[in-house]
Image: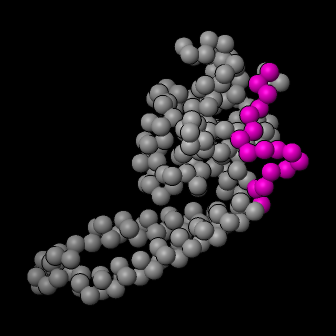
Amino acid sequence: MNFFLWNEISRNVEVNVGEVLLVREFANLWKPERNITKEDKTGEQRTRAYRELTYIWLACDWKSPYCDYSEYEKVEEAKKDADLTEEEFNDPLFRAACRKYVELQDQNWSIKMLNAARNMVSKFVDYFNNVDPEERDELTNKPVHKVKSIMEEVAKLYDLHESLEKYKAIVQKEISQTSGNRAGEVDGFMPNLKALK
């Protein structure tokens, strides 16, 4: 299910499924008293919550433009784009919402399998980053790794990448078919802020 949508024009996240704000961890982010900032003295505009939701989508959603980044890179880029301070990033309510988003997303087996495959490919990439074709055995001075074997393994890695991209497209299609709007909902639903006080 697509709880949030990325608005390319405003570079912000929009709430797509209003029911997500019934989930305790997201409702906590939405409280006006928690959203009081210099820009929003009453907290009614939820500017902090929107920045936090932006981070959650960029760092945790499998469709994020950063989904193929390493965990560290994802976190750093999402923090910059969401304009989160270290204090906001380390806030326990915010961190709980991040964990909840990952948990909800991982309920889908297709996404779970895609994430597992991505993690495995990432380990293969790390392996190849540490293989040195010029490394020599200290006793015999013979190459530790055979260039031909490395080339064959790299070719297989490319095939694995192609398979992963095909599976990603299948998952995207599956998710888009099952996450259609229901009963009058529209993409980019903006909740009635007064009703959620």
Quadrant of the rendered structure where residue 153 is? bottom left
Please tell me whether residue 190 belongs to the stretch shown in magenta: yes
Residue under the image location 41 percent in, 70 percent down: 124
- Residue name at image x 61 percent, y 16 percent: 40
Is the stretch drawn in magenta largely helix, strand or loop?
loop
Magenta part of the protein: which range?
Answer: 178-194
Q: Residue at x 41, y 77 (%)?
A: 157
Q: Is residue 63 left or right of residue 110?
A: left
Q: Is residue 108 visible?
A: no
In this picture, is 166 found above or below 41? below
In the rendered image, the vertical position of residue 39 relative to residue 85, given as above or below = above
In the foreground, 193 or 125: 193
Within the magenta stretch, is there residue 192? yes
Is the residue 173 above or below the residue 69 in the image?
Answer: below
User: Between 67 and 192, which is closer to the camera in this rendering?
Assistant: 192
Residue 31 visible here: yes
Residue 28 x, y percent position in the rendering = 70, 29
